Amino acid sequence: MFLSNPSAEQAHKVVASYKPSKFDKKILLWTGRFKTEEEIPPRIPPEMLDRARNKARVKACYIMIGLSVVACFAVIASAKKAAARHESLTSWNLAKKEKWRKEAALAAESKPK
């Protein structure tokens, strides 16, 4: 006998034996397994959660790859602007060390003998 609106627990063929936490429910929603939190049954099969976690890992990796590519282009653009201003890490380092030398000399002069 077919039900017109089977519950989520009846729709799964694997025995549901895992109670999902709030974070697990968010993963199930983010990966598109369920549309709303109310659709998530109280107990789900562990295999379903494993598949959702793997899909979430892949999505997170794709997001990190995208952010890395964007950051690379930002660094390239920043380096080109710095090169146009004739700035380099070497010149910054030399200026910083010169500043430290002056501060050390002033500190040595003001130090009581």
Image (tube, rainbow, N blue to C red):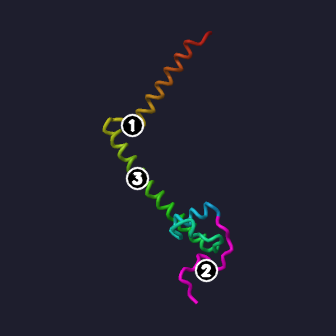
- Residue at 67% over, 68% down: 19
Q: Residue furthest left?
A: 84
Amino acid type of the residue tagged 1 in the rendering:
Ser
Label 2: which residue? Answer: 10
Label 3 – label 2 distance at C-alpha = 45 Å
**Label 1 secondary element:** loop
Label 2 – label 1 distance at C-alpha = 66 Å
Location of residue 55 in the rendering, given as x and y in whole percent from the top left corner: 53, 68
- Residue at 45% over, 33% down: 93
Label 1: which residue? Answer: 88
Please report the bounds of the magenta region as a residue range. Answer: 1-20
**Location of residue 93 with respect to 43 vertically, above or below:** above
| Number of numbered discs on residues | 3
- Residue at 32% over, 35% down: 85
Mark 3 crowd level (few <14, some 14–19, many ≥20, 10 Å Cα): few
Residue 67 forms part of the magenta stretch: no
In this rendering, position of residue 31 left or right of residue 14:
left
Label 3: which residue? Answer: 70
Q: Residue furthest top?
A: 113
Amino acid type of the residue tagged 2 in the rendering:
Gln
- Badge 3 vs badge 2, beta-carbon distance below 8 Å: no
Q: Nearer the viewer, mark 1 or mark 3?
A: 3
Q: Nearer the viewer, mark 2 or mark 1?
A: 2
**Location of residue 53 with respect to 88 vertically, above or below:** below
Amino acid type of the residue tagged 3 in the rendering:
Val
Q: Quadrant of the C terminus?
A: top right
- Residue at 61% over, 71% down: 41
Please state which of residues 7 and 101 is positioned toward the viewer in this rendering: 7
- Badge 1 vs badge 3, beta-carbon distance below 8 Å: no
